[in-house]
Amino acid sequence: MAMAETKATGKKVKFIITRQDGPETKPYTEEFELDYRPGMNVISSLMEIQRNPVNTKGEHITPVCWESNCLEEVCGACSMVINGKPRQACAALIDNLEQPVRIEPMRTFPVVRDLVIDRSRMFNALKRVKAWIPIDGTYDLGPGPRMAEKKRQWAYELSKCMTCGVCLEACPNVNEKTDFIGPAPISQVRLFNAHPTGEMNAEERLEALMEDGGIEGCGNSQNCVRACPKGIPLTTSIAEMNKATTKHMFKRWLGM
Amino acid sequence: MKGFYSRKLHSLLGIIPLGLFILEHMLTNFSAVEGGSQGFKDSVAFLNSLPLLLVLEIVGIYLPLLYHGVYGMYIAFQAKPNNGSYATERNLRYLLQRITGVIVFVFVFWHVYETRIQLALGKVTHDEMGSVMHGILTQPIFFILYAIAVVSASFHFANGLWSFLVSWGITVGPRSQRVSSYVCMTLFVIVSVMFVWSLFTFRTEEFAGATALLQNIRMIG
């Protein structure tokens, strides 16, 4: 849409934003009212608040902090809870949202400030399950085995994961009482174990899933697959990895 | 024991032997519906004629029940339900699995105290079990509590079977999980109906024992 079209229409949009000044401080809510513009989304609204940081009481406040990069729902940086559901703010069109629009940080992760969260645990989980294919060496290993087209097609779907954290936020078993790594890294094990070269290290990744906080943390609420913005079949991945870890368990016991 | 194995054991014990036990219990109770007071007495007598009875009870019921129950409490209280945000059927079943688990955990202690422990203490005999149940279930409050408990146990078993199939990698894709949902929820209805039906049967006059005995049971209850 051309910028020229985004003129004010007289309509107002109300926001209730949960803010927090620092990692240790108490959260509080602040209300904002913006002029409606056609095609506006949560990120453009936050930008507007940044430009003119005045709340509904007319007080001049410090602008709301948030994170965003790609603005096309592929990087995962702007994930936040919008009207009770975790999702990407850049893809949350105001036209499709109930008002007032309630915006909160994804509290499953440590809150840095306002809507900014620390998603380190997701990257630590990827390291834990070795979500990569080790091909480095001292000599050229040559081309690896080829992947069947049919397999490539479903594996590609799994590769769409952008580590956004929405599935962890939606999961009732990822919380401060458990050490469950969450659905995303489990699905990544399936992805890298499906790869013909990655498969050579399949057991290492399965064993990582069998450590504390691994795949056993799943409680089958299946919220993850409903919440995933990329439509990744997370519950199928989890069940597939349940099968693989169960097989691996018996193989190890029987010394096969 | 590492979490993976303790959780797997929890899942397995829920089906074998506990799932089998609940089906056996359902059938034994249902013999009251089918064969009346005598039919129930015969079923109880048959169970008690099994060899190595105490070993079967300890290995097949008490130890698995204790493990499944205690570990289950740990799982239940680790949950942070979000059914407001995700009002889906699966998420509701996730919550109900934990709630029914807690209900059944409490109920089992009460029920075992009223039946098996009274038997062990010599206060009642096997033949009097039907009238013990009559004594309990003719009291409206206890009847309601028993009805809630047996429906909870039936749900916990049937839905547990569904998640067992997922957790062991038997039902993997969405279609197989949907089909097994239908099968397991049908099983829930059948098991509940059979249990509740036998609860109603125990209320009939046929199961009333001697008045003195009844008084005794009312005191226990």
Image (cartoon, coloured by chain):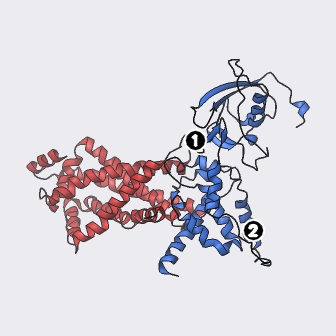
Chain colours: A blue, B red
Mark 1–mark 2 Cα distance, whole angstroms, equals 34 Å
Name the amino acid type tagged 2.
Arg
Mark 2 belongs to which subunit? A
Place residue A94 in its image quadrant.
top right
Could you tell me which quadrant the N terminus of chain A lies in? top right
Is there CB contact under 8 Å for labels 1 and 2? no
Residue at coordinates 53% horizontally, 65% vertically from top-left?
A210
Q: Secondary structure at mark 1?
A: loop
Res. B85 mark: 1
| Res A226 seen here | no
Residue at coordinates 16% horizontally, 45% vertically from top-left?
B218
Q: How many marks?
A: 2
Q: Residue at label 2? A: A152
Residue at coordinates 34% horizontally, 64% vertically from top-left?
B64
Residue ranking furthest to the left: B212
Q: Is residue A234 above or below residue A54?
A: below
Residue at coordinates 26% horizontally, 41% vertically from top-left?
B141
In front: A50, or B35? Answer: A50
